[in-house]
Image: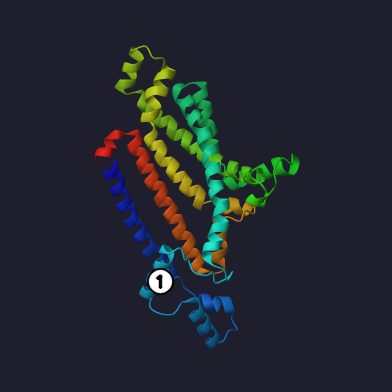
Amino acid sequence: MLRYALSRLLSLGLSLLVASVVVFAVIEVIPGDPAAFMLGLNATPEAVAALRDDLGLTGSAGLRYLDWAGGMLRGDFGVSYTYRVPVAELLADRLWVSLPLAVYALALSTAIALPAGMWAAARRGGAADIGVMGATQLGIAVPNFWFAMLLVLLFAVNLRWFPAGGFPGWDGGVMAGLKALTLPAIALALPQAAILARVMRSALIETLGQDYIRSARAKGLTRAQAIRRHGVRNALIPVLTILGLQFSFLLAGAIIIENVFYLPGLGRLIFQAITQRDLIVVESVVMLLVFAVICVTFAVDIAYAAVDPRLRRR
């Protein structure tokens, strides 16, 4: 198990190195000068040159990459061109919104999807199966931002159970923070739950056709007992893959939902940084998200080995 984990860590470390080079190179080839954009059309060449020097945009691309990458290793992400504060402070503030939102949404998605997928698989071809598959198809088809607006109209405007937007901060209490994140989490979770339920159903149906399930039934186990004791664990590998992808999406891809609910998260930060051409923030946020995806991938790989012992010998 240790050898397997170390090999995965080496692979993921190389992936992070390649990703940093790609991110820096892509940002470098974007047309336009951030300094000229910040100073406006009437800026003199001398003022633009002075601002470029102040922002660290002079020098060769190789040296700037090494300086940027070395700073990230030390926890120094540079200073925002727009906000004129350390990027690490911006990331810390926004991460405490996006990370709880992603975890909250993933927990809701898993709590809905796994029982629904198991229930549909156990009643394959019946009315329950057809109903669950119809509901999941609807969940996939409905855009989450449209569903988010319906949630706001119903639960915030009409019933006044939840706030329509904004985030009070965790200083105002955990319950107040969770209450502000509930509607965004539901809007993010339901489409993901629809996908996960379909994957769980398909994987479990395939597992139920295996010989060891028939042997378990022949030994006297009921269908439900065979599913719980033998079927679910062997159906978890594709489910774990989808869970890892969903967490990465929920952390990095909630830009629209964060704008609908006016949440000060990472998605909204990167959207603002792109529009303002604050390239150091864009680079830092993207690398943080890449690092998060790599860590989730590593956790999923370890979970694979825990579920399927055969992988530990590879």
Question: Image quadrant of residue 245?
Answer: top left
Could you classify mark 1 by the number of other residues whose Cα lies within 10 Å: few (under 14), some (14-19), or many (20 or more)? few
Task: Please identify the residue farthest to the left as the structure is shown.
Answer: 313
Q: Nearer the viewer, residue 127 or 311?
A: 311
Report the residue marked by disc 1. 67
| Residue at 56 percent of width and 87 percent of height | 44
Q: Is residue 251 left or right of residue 156?
A: left
- Amino acid carrying label 1: it is Asp
Instruction: Reply above or below: 133 against 13.
Output: above
Residue 172 in the image, given as x and y percentages of width and height: 68, 49
Number of marks present in the image shown: 1
Residue 121 in the image, given as x and y percentages of width and height: 44, 25
Quadrant (top left/top right/bottom left/bottom right) for the N terminus: top left
Type of colouring: rainbow
Q: Is residue 154 left or right of residue 107?
A: right
Instruction: Reply above or below: 131 against 81.
Output: above
Dot 1 falls on a residue whose secondary structure is helix
| Residue at 41 percent of width and 31 percent of height | 202
Instruction: Reply above or below: 40 against 5.
Output: below
Quadrant (top left/top right/bottom left/bottom right) for the C terminus: top left
| Residue at 37 percent of width and 60 percent of height | 19
Residue 282 in the image, given as x and y percentages of width and height: 49, 64
Q: Is residue 210 left or right of residue 105?
A: left
Q: Does residue 124 appear in the picture of this structure?
A: no
